[in-house]
Structures are given as C-alpha cells and as structure tokens.
Amino acid sequence: MATVDECRQALHDLAARMDANADKVRKQVDLDRTLACRITDLGTAFHGRLTGGRLVDLTDGDDPKAKIALNTTSDDLIRLVRGELDVPKALASRQMSIKANPLDLLKLRKML
C-alpha cells in the first residue's frame, strides 16, 4: 500500500506532466472542472481543478461538490499516474470509479 505522501507526490507528478502538455491538450479538450481524488484504502482525499489542460490548485482534503470524482486505492493511483494501469479495464472491473457527467467523461478520456 502506498502512503499518503506517495499519493500526493504522484498527483503533483501528474500535474507537472499535464502542465508540460497543456497546449496540446487545450486544443483538443475544453474542460474546466473541480476534481476530487479519493484514496479509499487510506481514507484520505485530494482536490484541485482541471482547467486549460492543466491540473491546478492541488491540495489535501476532499471536495464533496467536485464535478469529477475519482475513487481508487493508493496503489492503483500510483499505477495510473505511471501509465501502468489500463483505465478502461480498471473502470469495467470496478477497480476504480470516476463520477462525472457523461460529456465530461468523454473529455477525460481524451486527456488520459
């Protein structure tokens, strides 16, 4: 099981990678939504905002009003960020879940 610090670092790594590709993503995906990432096995959460192809304002704690919510385990979050997790399979097997409106899910798919 990964630690809270490892999960936090993974999300910051993801934010940095998204920042590096923001211009390309912004041209393909117009998305401005709040995001909550809930780590089920650690009982913790992080939240931020997806905007302009970037993940910004990332901080500890949950945002119950987030428009997009990712629920996953710490190890699966690490695997997701490293590109080692097949997202469609993980969603189909309920290994992880993403709650968002259908249009946002289509946009997220383009980002992943």
Image: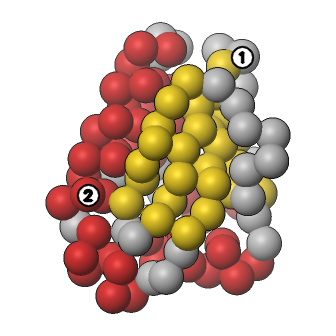
Q: Position of residue 46 (x, y in %)?
A: 58, 31
Q: In which quarter of the view is residue 22 placed?
A: bottom left
Q: Residue at x 33, y 88 (%)?
A: 27
Q: Dot 2 lies on which element?
A: helix
Q: Residue at x 59, y 38 (%)?
A: 47
Residue at numbered disc 2? 19
Q: In which quarter of the view is residue 36 placed?
A: top right
Q: Nearer the viewer, residue 63 or 95?
A: 63
The vertical placement of 62 against 22, above or below, is above
- Quadrant where the C terminus sits is bottom left
Say whether residue 9 is left or right of residue 49: left
Asked if one can make out residue 44 in the rendered structure from this viewpoint, the answer is yes
Query: Which amino acid, by three-letter code, is at mark 2?
Result: Asp
Q: Dot 1 lies on which element?
A: loop
Say whether residue 112 is left or right of residue 83: right
Q: Residue at x 69, y 57 (%)?
A: 68
Residue at numbered disc 1? 43
The vertical placement of 44 against 35, above or below, is above
Q: How is the image coloured?
A: secondary structure
Q: Earlier in the sequence, mark 2 or mark 1?
A: 2
Q: Nearer the viewer, residue 48 or 88?
A: 48
Query: Which amino acid, by three-letter code, is at mark 1?
Result: Gly
